[in-house]
Image (cartoon, rainbow, N blue to C red):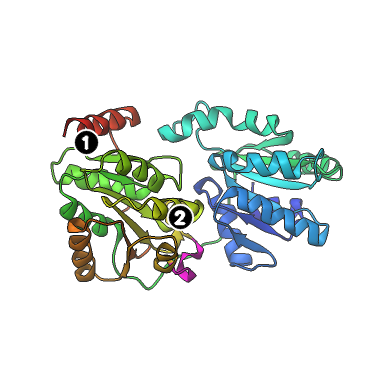
Amino acid sequence: MKVQKLVEMIGADFYTGVPDSQLKALCNYLMDTYGIDPKHHIIAANEGSCTALAAGYHLATGKVPVVYMQNSGEGNIINPVASLLNDKVYAIPMIFIVGWRGEPGIHDEPQHIYQGEVTIKLLEDMDIKTFIIGKDTADDEVKAAMDSFREILARGKQAAFVIRKGALTDAPKVEYKNDNTMTREEIIRHIVTVSGEDPIVSTTGKASRELFEIREANAQSHKYDFLTVGSMGHSSSIALGVAINKPDRKIWCIDGDGAMLMHMGALAVIGANKPKNMVHIVINNSAHETVGGMPTVAGSTDIVGVAKACGYPSTVSVDSFDALDTELAKAKSAHELSLIEVKCSIGAREDLGRPTTTALENKQNFMRDLNNT
């Protein structure tokens, strides 16, 4: 159905969420209509924060807000839905719009398979009434569902539209860009050159795909890399766990700004533990680029200052390859925790591939290298 039609049927004037490629039509519609406007549209750091933000909107206005997300974000909303929104607690009405990645019978990446299987069950277990919208769903069916939702919302409950692949159409064209010049793939290529045979933990999305293809192009083994294909925001914590238990290896973490923001508390834990063998690189294009390019707040966040306040002994920001190479070399030889923020452009190759090994093979090869060296 046309995305504008869905928005009109819902009739809400406040949306908050975390972008999803399955919901690109909705994301672009919101950006084209509102941009980032605290009265109408806010992109939050994670889905749980979106839910709390939307709850605050309801408390202040009495109106029903909308939270959008990929189904991977259901895990982040369980706590606020169960202990804040539920009608046995504060009875806060809310509409969720959920992109259904990994729908059974539809080919998808490994990190989405199980999440796709339990998407509807998780919503039902949280007492959230659901309606699935597919390519063939008629507008009248959606209207009827929304009418039934209103009765539920009036009782302080929640409802969700689950969006199948390609179900929303007629998205406006929105161009996402920044003024940075370095591409992420080339940045990662420079990291690989300096890190050599050191282990790398890379964040979810295109960064891991680019790392995999760089290894292929270099005819290098993939055993050095743990590709965090799912679990957005947790690669730095994975790297910390590895670094603490492999103190004789230099551990590199290739992170993204959206992922770093999603669970920024990890910086405080890393800074408190100060592993001397860890290099945390945040590639900052101020965008959720893997799922379409919608902005993050990283463009107005002092990442270096945050890391320093969290206890990182060495923090620096770079915006050129000369500066990047200098700081990578310093971090390689340093015996202290380091953070390097790298200012990056938005965009990737159209023909960017995906890992050809399974997630399980990746884990086994990475563990074998860690424990045999």
**Based on the displayed image, in which of its 4 quarters is residue 144 positioned?**
top right
Q: Is residue 138 left or right of residue 318?
A: right
The range drawn in magenta is: 295-302
- The reply, left or right, for residue 24 in relation to residue 350 is right
Q: Residue at x 43, y 45 (%)?
A: 234
Q: Is residue 17 visible?
A: yes
* Marked residue nearer the N-terminal end (2 or 1): 1
Name the image quarter holding residue 88. top right
Nearest the eye: 322 or 340: 340
Which amino acid, by three-letter code, is at mark 2?
Ala
Residue drawn 66% across the image and 50% down it: 51
Q: CA distance from mark 2 to mark 1?
A: 29 Å
Image height check: is 116 above or below 280?
above
Q: Is residue 171 visible?
A: no
* Label 1: how many Cα within 10 Å (few below 14, some 14–19, many 20+): many
Work out whether 144 lies above or below 279.
above
Residue at 37% over, 47% down = 203
Q: Which mark is residue 345?
A: none
Pick the quarter of the image with the C terminus: top left
Pointer 1 residue: 223
SS category of the residue bearing label 2: helix
Q: Look at discs 2 and 1 and give the one toward the viewer.
A: 2
Q: Amino acid at mark 1?
A: Lys
Q: Is residue 300 magenta?
A: yes
Which residue is identified by label 2? 268
